[in-house]
Image (cartoon, rainbow, N blue to C red):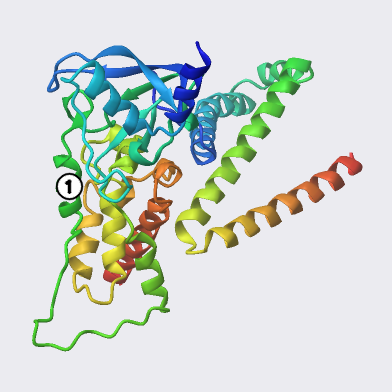
Amino acid sequence: MTLIGQALEYVAGMTSDILKVTIARGAGAGAATTPETFEVPAYENQTVLDVVSWVQQNADPTLSYRFACRVGMCGSCAMMVNGVPRWTCRTHISKVLDGSSVEIAPLRNLPVIKDLVVDMDPFFDKWVAAEGVHHSALTRHDPIAPIDEDSAARVEANAGIECINCSVCYAACDTVAGNADYLGPAALQRAWTLLNDAKDEGRAAILEAVSDKGGCHNCHSIGSCTAYCPNELDPMSAIAGLKRETAKSFFRKAR
Amino acid sequence: MRPVARAHPLWVAYIVHRLSGVALALFLPLHFWVLAMAVSAPQKLDGFLQLTEAGIVKLAEFGLVFLLAVHMFGGLRLMAMEWLPWTPGQKTLAASAAAVSFLIACLFFIRAI
């Protein structure tokens, strides 16, 4: 390579390295998945999502994947990267490379629509099934309820509100993998947040929903949700909170 | 494609607890069968107990005590984690205190024997 060529590459922030990127391809819904390897030029600053985008824009325009915000807010770009569920827009490729290769697959525990795109419906349906919806007792004519930011319940509620619904915890969870009815970490964490929210009036409905067949007591506290949550939330502890509250309410009823 | 990666400390704690539980469950019927010999066939039991002098059986006993200890502490860990609404820091402190006490107790035990 000439000196000018080297200089040009340096300016472009590009090295001559080539990444071996293996992507799980599949037509979805029962079709077989086949790994396909692409050679992608390595750049100095490159996320996993950048790599997938490069493949779609330069190597194979039929590659399907999802993303929207690219800054870790929308929760749509999660994929399995070397067997670990990750938000790909905020994961630098250099952090996950195995030598110069990486394997990218659709999120686990959800039906694949095509290539890297999964059907998120089961994930969001369970969110609702866990009563992860607002239960209001007030109308717009009532005064706004005062909230004590320092109360123990509010601190618990605040711990879970940064969830972006990316489904990384759901894909990481071995209990979901073994039990299709299990509501999963994200939905249960939402239920725990609402249970601790002074503005929410759904206590009885939430406790009923989360102690049902697919509820919080299915959790084995394996902790993959907490270990892999990209926003460093702690769904495992939230579910433990639900276990305590449902047990307390059960014994109170029995008396 | 490669399998799901799981090797984080919480998962290791989970799998050690479960596998030790399965191993102990397999051991228990054997244990009761040997104990039952005390009533049904005392001579056979004496013969069997002589086996316990063998090195390999001593090693197996070590394994058994290890399984029991690992399973007990795994269970205590799980109960503390799920039933005590402590902060992670408090739990780490409690676990360290238990570990240090256990180490000191072990040191005294080793000196004693």
Residue B1 visible, this angle: no
As drawn, is A229 to the left or to the right of A100? left
Q: Is residue A194 above or below residue A229?
A: below
State the quadrant of the C terminus of chain A: bottom left
Residue A144 or residue B102, whichever sits in front: A144
Residue matched to label 1: A124
Mark 1 secondary-structure assignment: helix
Residue farthest toward the front in the current orientation of the protein: A4
Could you tell me residue A8's position as x and y percent? Answer: 45, 23
Residue A30 visible, this angle: yes
Residue at 85% across / 45% down in the picture? Answer: B107
Residue A132 or residue A144, whichever sits in front: A144
**Which chain contains the residue that carries disc 1?**
A
Could you tell me residue A29's position as x and y percent? Answer: 12, 23
In the picture, residue B47 is in which quadrant?
top right
Q: Is residue B8 above or below residue A238?
A: above
Characterize the local packing of mark 1: few (<14), some (14-19) or many (20 or more) Cα atoms within 10 angstroms. Answer: some
Residue at 22% across / 43% down in the picture? Answer: A68
Q: Is residue A167 above or below residue A34?
A: below
Q: Is residue B66 above or below residue A249?
A: above
Residue B96 or residue A204, whichever sits in front: B96
Residue A46 or residue A140, whichever sits in front: A46
Residue at 24% across / 62% down in the picture? Answer: A207
Could you tell me residue A17's position as x and y percent? Answer: 47, 17
Could you tell me residue A92's position as x and y percent? Answer: 43, 35
Amino acid carrying mark 1 in the image: Phe
In the picture, residue A56 is in which quadrant?
top left
